[in-house]
Image (cartoon, helix red, strand yellow):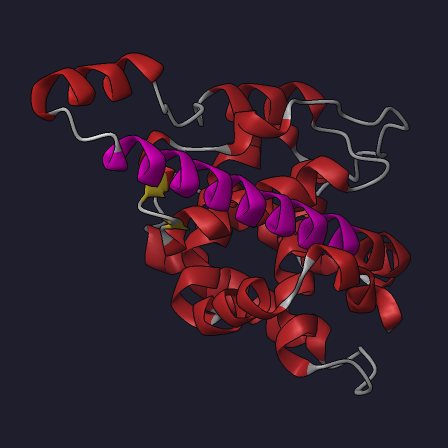
Amino acid sequence: MLPSRLLPWTPASQKPVELPAACAMDPKISNGARLQHEHITDLLVFGFLQNCCNSNFHKELKALGHDLPVPAYPREDYDDELQTDGNRCSHIVLEREETESENQEEIIQNIARQLAQIGDRMDSRIPPRVVNYLAMEFMNVDLSEEDRKDCLSAALEEVMKTYPKDMEKEKTMLMLTMLLAKKVADHTPSLLRGVFHTTVNFINQNLLTYVRNLVRNVRTSDVSSLASH
């Protein structure tokens, strides 16, 4: 059972955040044709927060986005490689990898958008005491990252008890984990950066296989099926 300590509730703003999708990307994100797994989660959590309605952390999210730079596929790198070995095949391969990574990023952004829509419908069902508890724990500078993940896990376990069983368990866990992050950032926007990184770490530790399979199996044309529950 979560401690019943309360913090002042900060009402959410009505203004949606508008950021370029590229802000969510990390320079390490492109390694061959596939995004590295940890950066898939970065994109997914950032996209979820970016697409949530009535959020109160626009400035903080924008700053976070600027700290996750765009991966580079510089044309001059292609030219240097061609001048070195005269092999145009590598140029073609790099262009194909860039296209495939962009396609995967689009799928991740669509998944994030659909999960955010589900989260918006469930937002009011998150008990304020759970959000208060998490916000207070994240403000404790003495907590380690493992302690923060444990607090997030305890909060997730608490809210999972109140949700219907007709939605796939892993999808519910993923959506609620990101929704808890959103609620904490709404409560105290200055916590956004810390709660973002803890949420990414928590998902990578507990739900990475599900996220990988979700991205692998979902196509842009049928991502709307995520919102069927």
Of residues 147 and 116, the one nearer the viewer is 116
Spot the residue most to the top: 76
The quarter of the displayed image where residue 49 is located:
top right
**Residue 31 vs residue 164: left or right?**
left
Query: Is residue 7 on the magenta stretch?
Result: no
Image location of residue 173, percent across then percent down: 63, 71
195 lies above or below 80: below
- Give the vertical position of 54 relative to 146 (above or below): above
Span highlighted in magenta in the image: 89-116
Please name the predominant secondary structure of the magenta segment in the image: helix
Residue in the picture at 70% in, 76% down: 160
- Residue at (59% x, 40% y) in the render: 46
Q: Is residue 59 above or below residue 42?
A: above
Instruction: Kindly indicate the quadrant of the structure image that contains residue 79.
Output: top left
Q: In this rendering, would 221 be left or right of 20?
A: right
Q: In this view, does 30 lie to the left or right of 152?
A: left
Q: Where is residue 92 in the image (x, y as percent from the top left)?
A: 35, 35
Viewport quadrant of the C terminus: bottom right
Who is closer to the viewer here, 172 or 25? 25
Of the pair 152 and 33, the residue shown nearer to us? 33
User: x, y (%) of residue 149?
Assistant: 44, 60
Give percent across and percent down for residue 203.
48, 62
In the image, farthest residue toward the left: 84
Q: Is residue 109 magenta?
A: yes
Q: Name the residue rendered at 50%, 62% in the picture.
A: 151
Numbered marks: total: 0
Q: In which quarter of the image is the N terminus?
A: bottom right
Q: Residue 20 or 187: which is nearer the viewer?
A: 20
Give residue 225's quadrant in the image: bottom right
Say which residue appears at 40% left-offset and 34% top-offset. 95
In this orientation, does residue 3 appear? no
For residue 97, side relative to residue 64 (left or right): left
